[in-house]
Image: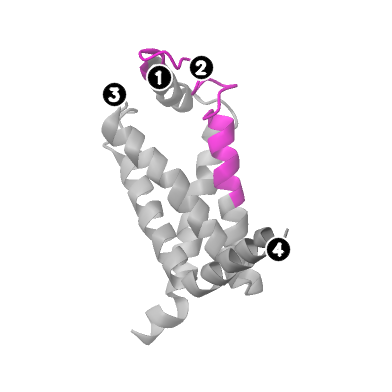
Amino acid sequence: MAFIRKYGHWIISIYIAVIFLDSLRFKFTNAHETQVIFGKLDAWANSFGAGGLFSQTGLFSQYVIGSAELIASALILFGLFTGRKTLHGLGGLIGVAVMTGAISFHLFTPLGIDPNNDGGGLFYAAIGVWLGSIAIAFLRRKQLLAFGCQIVRSLSEK
């Protein structure tokens, strides 16, 4: 148990960063797997008049999502290695947001759990990253709350 208390956040953080950073080679190179996923999502969005939402220039394109994953990874790793707990927590929050979207789209759109016929590996990795991101945000809740309070104070002074 002492090992988990001491190194658990390291293991979780590195797991999240590896998954996020590995996915970038698919998103940023416009790989076939990425085209299938975002193509299905864009066709679904088009069915209710929001076509282009998931296209390569859309609000939720592979490049936008990939950039959010890159930022989350950078914050998680930078915060972890430098001891900046607030940055670590912010990376976790971004990870929660991105993976909440990913899981929701897998579950509640025609995308489904296994869009690339990989046995659902992508979906299950998203769940693992989502849970890990929640754990990081929970571990850094004091720093995140203090940061949120600083922002509110700054905004209310104007």
Q: CA distance from mark 4 to mark 2?
A: 40 Å
- Residue at 56% x, 38% y is 66
Image check: 18 left or right of 158? left
Residue 154 figure quarter: bottom right
How far across and how far down the image is residue 15, in percent? 45, 58
| Count of picture labels | 4
- In this view, 62 is above or below 2: above
Disc 4 marks a residue whose amino acid type is Glu
**Mark 2: amino acid:** Gly
Q: Amino acid at mark 3?
A: Pro
Residue 111 as seen in the image, left or right of residue 8: left
Say whether residue 110 is left or right of residue 31: left
Disc 4 + disc 1, Cβ < 8 Å: no
Q: Which residue is identified by label 4?
A: 157
Tell me the amino acid under the disc marked 1.
Ala
The label shown at residue 110 is: 3
Other-residue count near label 2 (Cα within 10 Å), few / some / many at <14 / 14–19 / ≥20: some
Residue in the picture at 30% in, 27% down: 109
Which of discs 4 and 2 lies nearer the camera? The answer is 4
Residue 123 falls within the magenta-colored stretch: no
x 58%, y 34%: residue: 64
